[in-house]
Image (spheres, helix red, strand yellow):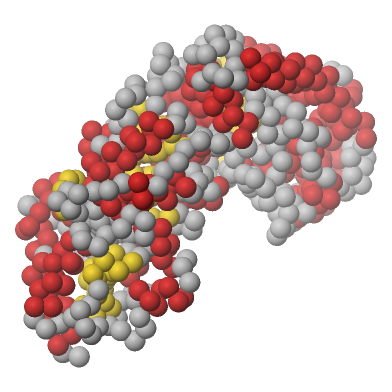
Amino acid sequence: MNPDLVHSLNSLRILSLDMISYAKSGHPGICLGAAPIIYTLYNNHLKVNPKDPSWINRDRFVMSAGHGSALLYAMLFMAGYDISIDDLVEFRKIGSITPGHPEYKVTPGVEVSTGPLGQGIANAVGMAMSEKYLAALIEEEIPKQKILDYYVYCLCGDGDLMEGVAMEAASLAGHYALDNLIVLYDSNDVTLDGKLSNTYSENILQKYMNMGWEVDFVGEGNDTREIDKAIERAKVNRKPTLIEIKTVIGRGSFHEGENLVHGKPLSKDDMVNVRKKYNISTNTMEITENAVKFVRQSINSRMKDNYNNWKKYFAEVKKTFSESNLKKILDFLETGNDDLTFSSSNFKIQSDYNEELRESNSKMMNIVSDRTKFFLGGSADLSTSCHTALYKDIEFGRKTPTGRNIAFGVREHAMGAILNGMALSGLRTFGSTFLVFADYLKPAMRMTALMNLPITYIFTHDSVTVGQDGPTHQPIEQLAMLRTIPNMTVFRPADINEVIGCWDYIINNKKPVSIVLSKDEAHILDGTSGEKVKLGAYIVRKEAQRLDAVLVSTGIDLTTTYLISEELRAKGIDTRVVSMPSVDLFLSQTEEYQNSIIPQNTKVFTIEASSTLPWYRFASRNCAIGIDTFGYSGSKEDVLEKVHFDYETILSKIEHNIKSN
């Protein structure tokens, strides 16, 4: 083997170990065992330009095994990205560009935030689907186009493959025959707690073949030539490829092959030992110029003409097709601008309008889809129930990659993570299911919010009013859960006016959003406003003369609250009705605005058919009216009465509380 290559590879190993030792925290096992995999990929295959990390046609690399971040950062430094030795010294420190696990938009060359095992594989599936979709759009204008033809590579370990989200996503990738997806499996037979055989005995290659993948095997994970050949073979496959590469965790350390080397820095004596074994004599956090030069020259010599020729080709296409439909696609690829506008002020709804909110939402989605090609998504086998189909579009598939309806199947967990991968490609995406199943999506939604991706999660069947389906399908705590996710804007609109307002916010703010919808019919209410939804809360019905109490409500429950307010007024109790479609947006308003809607020192009731926990910040003592028990199977009316959330019970609670104080 080339001695310069050996020195460079071993330098990568030691540099990543130095980072961990210096930080006194990290995962050295993967750095020693998997270094040949990531080194071979970057040195020989990955189509990138470190000086232009956002190049449109770059290959994407996902470090699903995000605990190997030190190895990734050291590799990115050696490859020539805008990362310095000083940045590596700051590994795992506050404010550094080298955090403990890879983070999107923090480190040059990092495509996605990873760490929760399995998520990265599913993200990679989403990225591969996006490449297929966008390339197919271009193909409609330029047959055999070369603007987009990149691969998505993913490095994963045993832990990733054991997670259910990875299996869900891999199943879908095989079904769609995503031949632009190559997964490099660091197979070391060790997990954090011990030997893999303690918990896992499946034939992983056979399993992936059964899911529609091509598979390959490299028996010696330290042999860069064999890894190189396997990647070359994967590139010509017509299916996604899993390459199992047998490695030794902590190779060369005192604890090689043991779980002890997974997540604990090596001892000083062991660091001396591995330096000697790998023939690296540099001081801590030093690397030879030759080691870095070898990698950078390899990448530059392999990529210089490729990159420059692509740039010329792209410029020629832009000039030639400046007046065609292709122009919007090219502009989108360059700038991320989808040229989409939406304003709630453009909609005028008649006062007698009455329909299910999921249907109102469907109409808004289809208006959006008519205006841009860069809005797509699907459901977890519930599009007919959630009403989230894009009516003018076909399903995405291996033969129909321009389809914008994605049939995720019953795979909520993978759906969220795949949507993240697609959004990382610049697309606006949506996914839908019943609210009670939001729990399946939670890990992926958390990553959506962490990366601030423009994904819209659509949850229908939002309360116990689903009736006969029973408590397994009646959400109680899910709204509270969604509202606790930082940077996730949660809407529960009351009527079509507010649904329109939700989509006004979604389109004009590229941020993570959850919209929660009833399957019940909703009458348009006097006083609701699409334009005020962005404020989070506003007054729907003012008190007539004096303010005895404020009634705050959301969603379909606002109708009940409105009617109760009218009856209370007839009984001499004057109340204000406030719609709060988004708690977090209301809390982001000025204190002056908040006090104008919910005055201080005023009795406040909150009415929502879900957990009362989020409402104690607003409600007066004993005035949070909701549901804190599981539901029952029965008619809507009987269930509401059983859980004490029927009209008469709510009215009685409010009236009794006001009169007794």
Q: Which residue is at a point 89% across and 30% down the rendered structure image? A: 293
Say above or below: 57 vs 26: above
Compared with 511, 11 (above or below) is above
Picture coordinates of residue 520 (x, y %)?
A: 16, 49
Q: Position of residue 166 (x, y in %)?
A: 47, 34
Quadrant location of the C terminus in the rendered image: bottom left
Q: Residue at x 38, y 37 (%)?
A: 368
Circle count: 0
The one nearer the camera, 137 or 184, is 137
Q: Is residue 242 left or right of residue 320?
A: left
Q: Quadrant of residue 342?
A: top left
The image quarter containing residue 22 is bottom right
Q: Is residue 15 something one can see in this rendering?
A: yes
Give the residue displayed 17% in from the left and 48% down from the top: 353
Observer-nearest of 381 and 440:
381
Give the vertical position of 41 relative to 532 (above or below).
above
For this view, does 334 lie left or right of residue 603?
Answer: right
Would residue 436 be visible to someone looking at this image?
A: no
Spot occupied by residue 186 in the image (x, y as percentages of width and height): 62, 30
| Camera-nearest residue between 660 and 208 | 660
Query: From the image, which quarter does the N terminus lie in?
Result: top right
Q: Residue 363 at what x, y percent from top left?
A: 28, 38
